[in-house]
Image (tube, helix red, strand yellow):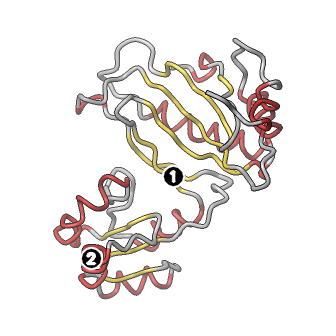
Amino acid sequence: MKHGKKYNDGAKLIEAGKFYDVDEAVAVAVKTGTAKFDETVEVHVRLGVDSRHADQQVRGAVVLPNGTGKTVRTLVLAKDDKAEAAKAAGSDYVGAEELVAKIQNENWLDFDVVIATPDMMGLVGRLGKVLGPRGLMPTPKAGTVTPDVAKAVTEAKAGKIEYRLDKTNIIHCPIGKVSFGADKLKENLDTLMSAIVKAKPAATKGQYIKSCTVATTMGPGIKLNVAKFGA
């Protein structure tokens, strides 16, 4: 696979076969982020679990202390006082049946996070085929099915991210932008990894965190020394 000049320049900053400590890894990642836009820094964590088994699922949400650098658009499905609370918290869209119909009929998806009160889940269930494949379906585990919609909106806006296994047992998460600098990125990375370690299923056998790589949107991957995470 051929890579561009910027990618190759970034690759020269990374020692082949080296496993980096977190501090050094994020510092190198910042140096590789030389695109004309503010690149996102992402973490890819491969876990020693089997996502096909219900007792080995790893999924949850965590508020990154420095946010993600992304403007998050929230959609809240709620009624009456809960709807008013969501509006007061600054949700971009608030409604009930009319918004569900808009998503169903117009394939409207101009939002990043969907939050719903528990009593709305019968209605939300109709959107499974649309929201599910896009990772937008609200769930109690991610804190997006909750009676406290105002808190959920505030957290989503502040940089709450959801982590979940894909079919290859890897978690992919953004931890901020290159412009954050190494210190803020390290803080966000440590917060995310602590949450993933705490979410370790009891059924896991052997090494839990198999590998961890940090990379900017356009840059090469930097391998982390996973022994530091104690899992």
Q: Earlier in the sequence, mark 2 or mark 1?
A: 2
**Structural distance between the alpha carbons of marks 2 and 1:** 23 Å
Q: Find residue 168 and report its image quarter.
A: top left
Query: What number of labels is visible?
Result: 2
| Residue 8 drawn above or below residue 154 | above
Q: Amino acid at mark 2?
A: Val
The disc at residue 127 is: none
Question: Label 2: how many residues lie within 10 Å, few (<14), some (14-19) or many (20+)?
Answer: some
* Residue at x 55%, y 66% (from the top left corner): 72
The image position of residue 173, as x and y in percent, is: 54, 43
SS class of the residue under badge 1? strand
58 or 28, which is in the foreground?
Answer: 28
11 or 86, which is in the foreground?
Answer: 11
The image position of residue 139, as x and y in percent, is: 31, 56
Q: Quadrant of the N terminus?
A: top right
The disc at residue 161 is: 1
Position of 77 with respect to 47 (left or right) is left
Position of 119 with respect to 107 (left or right) is left
Per the image, the residue denoted by label 2 is 100
Question: Label 1: how many residues lie within 10 Å, few (<14), some (14-19) or many (20+)?
Answer: many
SS class of the residue under badge 2? helix
The image position of residue 43, as x and y in percent, is: 59, 37
Q: Are marks 2 and 1 in contact (CB under 8 Å)?
A: no
* Residue at x 24%, y 80% (from the top left corner): 101
* Residue at x 38%, y 74% (from the top left corner): 76
| Residue 175 drawn above or below residue 99 | above
The residue most toward the front is 2
Q: Amino acid at mark 1?
A: Ile
- Which of labels 2 and 1 is toward the front? 2
